[in-house]
């Protein structure tokens, strides 16, 4: 009888569509999103409907396996499940799903399940701004958001998505420059099974230009994502939308493959210390093509349960021309969490090192740093036309040079002509999306390197006057291909 009961429970768990694609303990140091193996899995897009009037929301799915992928999308709202859509993708094909049209206006979060490997991102586009971010392949007991803003021109909504069969209870901790707060209104929040809840952080933390947030579950599991809207009326007149994936696991070493800072682009690196013991952290800026004459790293002493930040645009040792990568490492190996925000208030002449800079008139974006390097990365839903343009950043963290091949894959799965770049040891390259494809519309940008690298992509939305800088998605055949930064 006991064996029969256990078998029934196991069957129920396997049937429930909200199961994790990979057990959490299997990939303790992975990025927030990754596809591993050839059996598919589940993806969770938490902050799909962010409450902006007139916003268009979409989920972009690309098949990255060798065969067809049967894909199911389920919408979830505050009251429970919404609509469902099933599609079949050929190998390499991409599907853009209009969330409202396909899953209903009540769908605030989306779960995507596939029987073969896929990469999933979600985007929002409106007069308020635009952004696009990878969805998550994991739930977690903890989620970290180092860079949050509730200044008078900004809203901050924390999406808590529970696609599982049991209710979840969570606490939200706030790290300020003066200490740690656990607001009563953010303690013991219940997220019912099969629903998504949005928490207005501005109601508990008012008028803050910078603070950090940690989400901890008391019971159950959630997927957390931050959505911010800036209206352009603040002291720094930035306008746009931020979709910010949470970080699951603190690490000792982090990397940001690309970035830039100048008089009209404030780039801030924030480091959160989740432990009670102070941690010394080095923030090393690496100019593209300048690895032989690195600027002195920034040394930050981060108190326990607090954060420290550095505004790179205010530092004379950071060049205001061209691109750079950023490496963050704790001196004694203590785990921390790192993120980068970028606020652009006007265009600038970036010269030959950054010609795209003249087309970025404004916008805002925040992205978690990456903790791992792999050989294959995919950015889906990118393009090079009047509606969108951008770059792919490839950072080589190794002590030896590597060769990276980049190719555009059209929505029907047809691959374009590949381009190759040699990336020197410790250096990076920026590749324009227009170099990969001249066809109108979106495509998936695939990076395949000889050795593990870190990849991000920069998207510019001229119609929304906004910008998006996020990690690409690692694609792994197995876990042996994942290299943890810092060893």
Image (tube, helix red, strand yellow):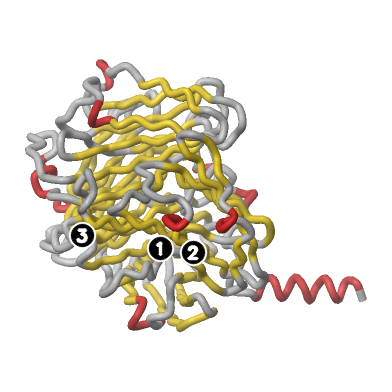
In-front residue for pair 142/199:
199
Q: Viewer-proximal residue, 479 or 278?
A: 278
Asked if residue 304 is positioned above or below residue 92 in the image, the reply reads above
Mark 1 and mark 2 lie on one chain; the one further toward the N terminus is: 2
Indicate the position of residue 417 as horizontal and vertical percent values. Answer: 20, 54
Residue indicated by mark 1: 120
Q: Nearer the viewer, residue 310 or 123?
A: 310
Q: Residues within 10 Å of mark 1 (few under 14, many from 20)?
A: many
Q: Residue at x 43, y 77 (%)?
A: 107
**Where does the image place residue 130, in percent across and percent down from the top left?**
25, 61
Q: Residue at x 30, y 66 (%)?
A: 124
Q: How many marks?
A: 3
Whether residue 23 is visible, yes or no, is: no
**Secondary-structure class at tag 2:** strand
Q: CA distance from mark 3 to mark 2?
A: 23 Å
Residue 383 numbered tag? 3
Q: Which residue is mark 2?
A: 43
The residue that appears at 43% across and 41% down in the rendered structure is 370
Percent of width and height locating residue 291: 27, 21
Kindly indicate the quadrant of the structure image that contains residue 379.
bottom left
Q: Residues within 10 Å of mark 2 (few under 14, many from 20)?
A: many
Helix, strand or loop under label 1: strand
Neighbours of disc 3 within 10 Å: few (<14), some (14-19), many (20+): many
Quadrant of the rendered image containing residue 209: top left
* Structural distance between the alpha carbons of marks 1 and 2: 7 Å
User: In terms of image quadrants, where is residue 394?
Assistant: top left
The answer for how far apart the CA atoms under marks 3 and 1 are is 16 Å
Tags 1 and 2 touching, CB below 8 Å: yes
Q: Earlier in the sequence, mark 3 or mark 1?
A: 1
Q: Is residue 70 above or below residue 366?
A: below
Q: Judge from the rendering whether residue 448 lies leftward or rightward of residue 137; answer left or right.
A: left
């Amino acid at each position: 009888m006991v064996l029969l009961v256990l078998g029934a429970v196991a069957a129920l768990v396997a049937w429930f569509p909200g199961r994790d694609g990979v057990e959490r303990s299997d990939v303790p140091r992975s990025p927030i999103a990754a596809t591993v193996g050839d059996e598919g899995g589940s993806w969770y897009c938490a902050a799909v409907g962010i409450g902006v009037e007139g916003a268009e929301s979409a989920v972009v799915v690309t098949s990255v396996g060798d065969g067809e992928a049967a894909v199911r999308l389920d919408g979830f709202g505050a009251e429970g499940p919404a609509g469902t859509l099933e599609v079949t993708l050929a190998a390499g094909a991409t599907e853009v799903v209009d969330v409202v049209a396909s899953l209903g206006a009540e769908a605030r979060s989306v779960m995507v399940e596939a029987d073969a490997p896929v990469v999933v991102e979600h985007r929002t586009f409106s007069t308020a701004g635009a952004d696009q971010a990878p969805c998550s392949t994991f739930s977690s007991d903890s989620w970290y958001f180092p860079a949050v803003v509730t200044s008078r021109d900004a809203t901050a909504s924390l999406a808590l998505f529970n696609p599982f069969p049991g209710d979840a209870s969570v606490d939200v901790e706030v790290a300020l420059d003066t200490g740690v707060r656990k607001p009563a209104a953010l303690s013991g929040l219940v997220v019912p099974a099969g629903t998504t809840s949005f928490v207005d952080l501005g109601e508990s933390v008012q008028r803050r230009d910078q603070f950090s947030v940690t989400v901890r579950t008391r019971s159950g599991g959630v997927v957390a994502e931050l959505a911010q809207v800036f209206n352009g009326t603040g002291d720094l007149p930035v306008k746009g939308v931020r979709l910010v994936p949470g970080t699951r696991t603190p690490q000792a070493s982090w990397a940001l493959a690309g970035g830039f800072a100048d008089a009209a682009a404030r780039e801030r690196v924030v480091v959160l210390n989740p432990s009670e013991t102070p941690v010394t952290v080095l923030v090393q800026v690496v100019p593209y093509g300048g690895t032989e004459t690195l600027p002195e790293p920034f040394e930050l002493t981060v108190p326990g349960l607090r954060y420290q930040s550095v505004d790179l645009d205010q530092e004379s040792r950071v060049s205001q021309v061209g691109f750079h990568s950023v490496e963050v490492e704790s001196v004694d190996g203590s785990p921390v969490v790192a993120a980068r925000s970028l606020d652009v208030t006007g265009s600038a002449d970036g010269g030959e090192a950054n010609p795209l800079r003249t087309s970025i008139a404004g916008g805002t974006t925040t992205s978690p740093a990456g903790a791992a390097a792999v050989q294959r990365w995919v950015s889906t839903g990118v393009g090079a036309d009047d509606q969108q343009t951008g770059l792919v950043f490839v950072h080589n963290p190794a002590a030896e040079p590597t060769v990276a091949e980049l190719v555009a894959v059209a929505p029907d799965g047809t691959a374009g002509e590949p381009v190759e770049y040699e990336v020197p040891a410790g250096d990076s390259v920026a590749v324009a999306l227009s170099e990969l494809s001249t066809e109108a519309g979106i495509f998936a940008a695939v990076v395949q390197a000889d050795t593990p690298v870190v990849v991000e992509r920069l998207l510019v939305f001229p119609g929304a006057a906004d910008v998006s800088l996020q990690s690409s998605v690692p694609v792994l055949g197995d876990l042996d291909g994942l290299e943890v930064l810092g060893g």
